[in-house]
Amino acid sequence: MASVANSPFYILKPPNHTHYKLSSGIRTTLWSFSCSNAQFLTLQTSKHKSSTITCFATDKQTSSTEISSTARIRSEVLTPFRSVRMFFYLAFIASGGLGGLIATTQLIAALTNPSRALDAPEIAKGLGIDLGAVSLFAFLYLRENKAKNAQIARLSREENLSNLKLRVSEKTVIPVSSLRGIARLVICAGPASFITESFNRSEPFTEGLVERGVLVVPLATDGNMPSFEFEESEEAKDITTKRKRLWQLTPIYVTEWTNWLDEQKKLAGVTSDSPVYISLRLDGRVRGSGVGYPPWNAFVAQLPPVKGMWSGLLDGFDGRV
């Protein structure tokens, strides 16, 4: 069967074409997915009236800039008093604006009426105070709103990342969110040669990385497959097992991963062809990133070992979920 890559499939209105007709009494439902590694389409049948289907490939992608309700809720949880502050800023702006409007009319009346000319300096002083208050609280509101938008955008990007898919084993595909609280992911993105060299550089730190719950997501951006060579001797059996565990994940739907990565690079001012790494916390938030090879020695030195219930979860994680 021909390989199908990088494009999702949709069921359309049946065309009037004899080649698409199905047997009477059978309805066929097409379940498919977008994946550069996908090779087959899965068909399921059930008894129903005669139907007709066709499918086509499309490059349409969901925009990663869409703000999810989950990101907004997380933002409210992380900064519970921000909305209160912004409400009071708006209230003070409205109050100062109303006071300034009243003071402006009084100042105009004083300047046009010689009998009230002596009140003009005092009214002008009050107007200045009102304008200063409006300017101050407008500045505070805009700064708070900018911080809110930046936080929601960051949380939304993290939410988009959590929905990306990983292949753990031959028959197991999970979203990144399934590893929250279980593993610290390190996304290693670049040409296949860059990933292979990162793999080789991680060898001296394998045991420390595994103890700290690190799992690597190798994302080849040049379309080539990185080459991982494991020593299969009896003496190196233990370390080989740990290295395979450290590098067991494979990103699928590579186009979606690449789109997410390109957005991160654009926001960070990094060129699209630069090899980078992105490390995540146990809770799925981005911990740090950089251009070049991941600092495996720094991860071992800075990250605490995974202990207690986290250790139990990680020890039991063999790709079956």
Image (cartoon, rainbow, N blue to C red):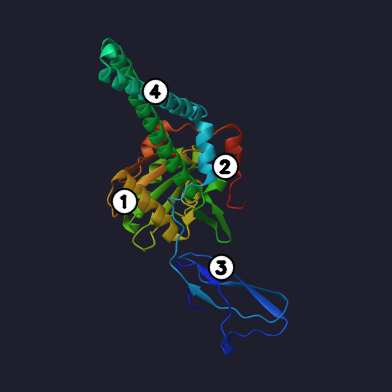
- Judge left or right: residue 39 versus residue 200: right
Is 173 above or below relative to 117? below
Give whichever of discs 3 and 1 has the lower sequence position.
3
Q: Say few, some or many: other residues with alpha carbon within 10 Å of mark 3 (under 14 / 14 to 19 / 20 or more).
A: some
Front-lying residue, 159 or 318? 159
Disc 3 marks a residue whose amino acid type is Ser
Task: Name the residue rendered at 41%, 48% in the picture.
Answer: 187
Question: Mark 3–mark 2 contact, CB under 8 Å?
Answer: no
Q: CA distance from mark 1 to mark 2?
A: 28 Å
Front-lying residue, 245 or 238? 245
As drawn, the label of residue 275 is 1
> Which dot, 4 or 2, sits closer to the camera?
4
Residue where numbered disc 3 is placed: 32
> Which dot, 1 or 4, sits closer to the camera?
4
Task: Name the residue rendered at 70%, 80% in the picture.
Answer: 26
Question: Mark 4–mark 2 contact, CB under 8 Å?
Answer: no
Q: CA distance from mark 4 to mark 3?
A: 59 Å
Residue where numbered disc 4 is placed: 96
Q: Say few, some or many: other residues with alpha carbon within 10 Å of mark 1 (under 14 / 14 to 19 / 20 or more).
A: many
Residue 282 in the image: x percent, y percent? 51, 38
Give whichever of discs 3 and 2 has the lower sequence position.
3
Circle 4: element type = helix
Circle 2: element type = helix
Front-lying residue, 285 or 69? 69
Q: CA distance from mark 3 to mark 2?
A: 31 Å
Question: Mark 1–mark 2 contact, CB under 8 Å?
Answer: no
> Which dot, 3 or 2, sits closer to the camera?
3
Give whichever of discs 1 and 2 has the lower sequence position.
1
Disc 2 marks a residue whose amino acid type is Leu
